[in-house]
């Protein structure tokens, strides 16, 4: 069901401003069939705005957004897109089954109601009224609505907020099954471990710009950062926090204390080799030295901090231009 070009979605130099705020800034991005894509970014990075643009809920100021080679609205009317957004109340005074039946019915290739109820794990609450559900149950109903249409693209904005651990796992298993069936799943999240374990592609937005795009492993590698951990025992050299922080390549520092005056040091280093060499040069004797790769969360922090620092460095130049 592709478009010939194999493009599910495409942003071409898309920008969106709200007054003085640039929510999306020159976004170029193509999504392909069968990809599971996580959209990450700090608060206000432009994740929800990008999803709104993708779904045709907002128009870009510049550039264009396409779904399946045409305008978003056409793809949505053709029933090719399922979405689970953060906001928007569910219909009240209807039962769960009725709402799911409605969603299955409006899609040309919709699944059967019982299959969707089972997949979303809401068979047991099918006869409950939608406005009498807990937050997590409501999320599962939203999920059911997003998968009811057997859509080619599923868009989810922070889908697992409010779900407990078992529901969350069932949710992601269902999403993986969707992707295995050739559908594209795009989800925005603040849970980096979800992105790490579920997504085969990770996008990082910062102030509306795409600052990283790759597999989780690539993003960790590109962040270039590693964790340097060691202990300093009394007599191992004089090292206060200021000295440690001033070592080359240090992006983050945690110093803890243990009995007997032993200090535990954890450094997030953009250049672990330079950092370790400088430790010895400073006359320190780090014990139990460990250099390990970062998790996605630490990598995410490193690249968003770098982007913020680059921006701060560029800002004075911008001022003088104006
Ligand atoms: N309707 C709006 N009017 C004015 N500004 C808006 C509007 N919607 C979003 N913004 C601004 O655009 C920027 C991007 O917001 P957006 O909601 O897309 O970010 P986000 O990455 O989804 O954030 P969060 O993680 O907090 O949900 C923010 O600075 C936000 O304040």
Image (cartoon, rainbow, N blue to C red):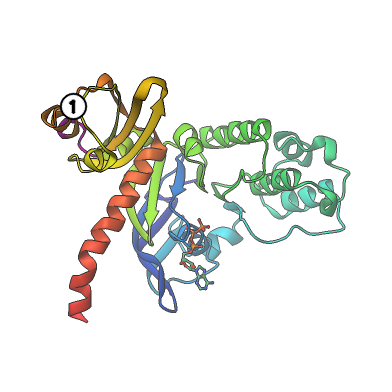
Q: Residue at x 45, y 43 (%)?
A: 37
Q: Does 131 lie within the magenta span?
A: no
Please determine whether, in this image, residue 301 is positioned above or below residue 42. Answer: above
Q: Residue at x 84, y 42 (%)?
A: 126
Q: Residue furthest left?
A: 281
Q: Residue furthest top?
A: 288
To which quarter of the image does residue 239 belong? top left
**Which region is colored magenta?**
270-274
Query: Which residue is tagged 1?
Result: 284
Q: Closest to the observer: 74 or 188?
A: 188
Residue 153 pos. (x, y %): 53, 48
Residue 91 pos. (x, y %): 79, 59
Q: Closest to the observer: 254 or 167?
A: 254
Residue 29 pos. (x, y %): 36, 54
Image side of residue 187 versus residue 82, left or right: left
In which quadrant is the C terminus drawn? bottom left
Please determine whether, in this image, residue 29 is positioned above or below residue 290. Answer: below
């Amino acid at each position: 069901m592709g478009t010939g070009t194999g493009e599910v979605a495409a942003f071409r130099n898309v920008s969106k401003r709200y007054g003085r705020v640039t929510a999306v800034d020159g976004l170029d991005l193509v999504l392909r069939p069968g990809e599971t894509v996580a959209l990450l970014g700090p608060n206000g990075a432009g994740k929800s705005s990008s999803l709104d643009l993708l779904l045709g809920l907002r128009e870009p100021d510049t550039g264009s957004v396409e779904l399946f080679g045409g305008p978003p609205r056409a793809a949505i009317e053709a029933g090719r897109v399922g979405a689970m957004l953060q906001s928007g109340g569910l219909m009240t005074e209807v039962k769960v089954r009725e709402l799911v039946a409605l969603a299955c019915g409006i899609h040309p290739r919709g699944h059967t109601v019982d299959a969707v109820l089972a997949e979303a794990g809401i068979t047991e609450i099918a006869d409950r009224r939608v406005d009498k559900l807990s937050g997590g149950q409501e999320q599962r109903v939203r999920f059911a609505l997003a998968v009811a249409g057997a859509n080619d693209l599923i868009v989810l904005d922070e889908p697992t907020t409010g779900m407990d651990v078992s529901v969350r796992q069932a949710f992601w298993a269902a999403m993986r099954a969707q992707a295995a069936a050739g559908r594209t799943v795009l989800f925005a999240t603040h849970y980096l471990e979800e992105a790490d374990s579920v997504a085969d592609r990770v996008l990082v937005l910062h102030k509306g710009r795409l600052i990283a795009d790759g597999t989780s492993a690539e993003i960790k590698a590109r962040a270039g950062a590693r964790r340097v951990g060691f202990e300093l025992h009394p007599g191992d050299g004089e090292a206060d926090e200021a000295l440690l922080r001033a070592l080359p390549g240090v992006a983050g520092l945690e110093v803890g204390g243990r009995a007997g005056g032993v200090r535990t040091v954890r450094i997030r280093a953009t250049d672990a080799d330079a950092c370790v060499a400088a430790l010895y040069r400073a006359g320190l004797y780090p014990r139990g030295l460990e250099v390990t790769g970062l998790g996605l969360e630490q990598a995410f922090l490193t690249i968003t901090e770098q982007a913020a620092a680059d921006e701060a460095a560029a800002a004075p130049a911008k001022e003088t231009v104006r």
